[in-house]
Image (spheres, rainbow, N blue to C red):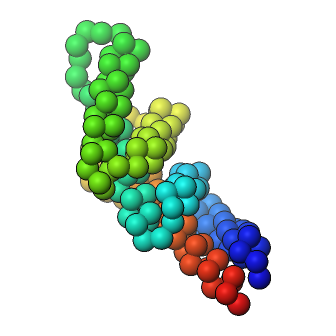
């Protein structure tokens, strides 16, 4: 089987499986399929293999942590500024620090950090999740759910790469 056909079969089958697992919520964790697809793609865009698996997970979770800090600052620190101005300042500082942190090899894939940050922000702002929900140490915490979703996406990327290799060599 050609490499392209093997990749198409692998990704197609695993995308169907992922959709079933996430949408049926078989684990009862309320995971987000769209977030998993972000890191699935990020895994391949980061070069694949074990290094990309580690990098994709670390960078996307770093983005989630940066997002948590931003939301908590926005909601817990009152400087008397309007929300758009205060949020703009917070995001400016977060983006600055994310890029500076890229000097640490584990966090050097800056786009994937921003993917994690954006996935977290989308979940929080579009669903209107209160900042206090981020402080609850449970699997029901939205930050945990988005983090697990991002991890699962990277894992699906890794598995699809391995399955592609097996199919292409047959």
Left-right relation of 103 to 7: left
Task: Return the x and y of residue 72 as percentages of the image width and height.
Answer: 28, 32
Image position, residue 91 (x, y; %) = 36, 26
In terms of image quadrants, where is residue 13?
Answer: bottom right
* Residue displayed at 34% across by 24% down: 92
Q: Is residue 8 left or right of residue 76?
A: right
* Residue 129 screen position, x and y as percent: 43, 37
**Quadrant of res 37:** bottom right
Quadrant (top left, top right, bottom left, bottom right) of the C terminus:
bottom right
**Residue 8 vertical position relative to residue 56 in the rendered view, above or below:** below
Between 88 and 25, the one lying in front of the other is: 88
Say which of 67 and 1 sits in front.
1
Q: Nearer the viewer, residue 19 or 134?
A: 19
Q: Residue at x 32, y 50 (%)?
A: 107
Q: Quadrant of the N terminus?
A: bottom right
Residue drawn at x 62%, y 80% as measured from the top left:
165
Q: Is residue 143 above or below residue 11?
A: above
Residue 61 appearing in the image: no
In terms of image quadrants, where is residue 80? top left
- The residue located at (36%, 12%) in the rendering is 85
């Amino acid at each position: 089987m050609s490499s392209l056909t093997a990749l198409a079969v692998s990704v197609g089958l695993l995308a169907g499986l992922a959709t079933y697992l996430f949408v049926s919520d078989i684990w009862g964790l309320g995971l987000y399929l769209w977030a998993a697809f972000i890191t699935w793609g990020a895994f391949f865009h980061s070069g694949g293999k074990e290094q990309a698996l580690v990098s994709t997970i670390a960078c996307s979770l770093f983005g989630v942590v940066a997002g948590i800090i931003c939301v908590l600052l926005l909601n817990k620190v009152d400087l008397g500024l309007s929300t758009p101005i205060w949020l703009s300042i917070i995001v400016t500082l977060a983006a600055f620090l994310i890029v500076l942190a890229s000097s640490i090899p584990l966090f050097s894939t800056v786009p994937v950090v921003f993917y994690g940050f954006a996935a977290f922000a989308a979940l929080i702002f579009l669903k209107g999740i209160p900042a206090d929900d981020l402080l609850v140490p449970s699997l029901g915490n939205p930050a945990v759910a988005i983090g697990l979703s991002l991890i699962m996406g990277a894992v699906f990327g890794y598995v699809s790469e391995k399955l592609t290799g097996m199919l292409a060599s047959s």
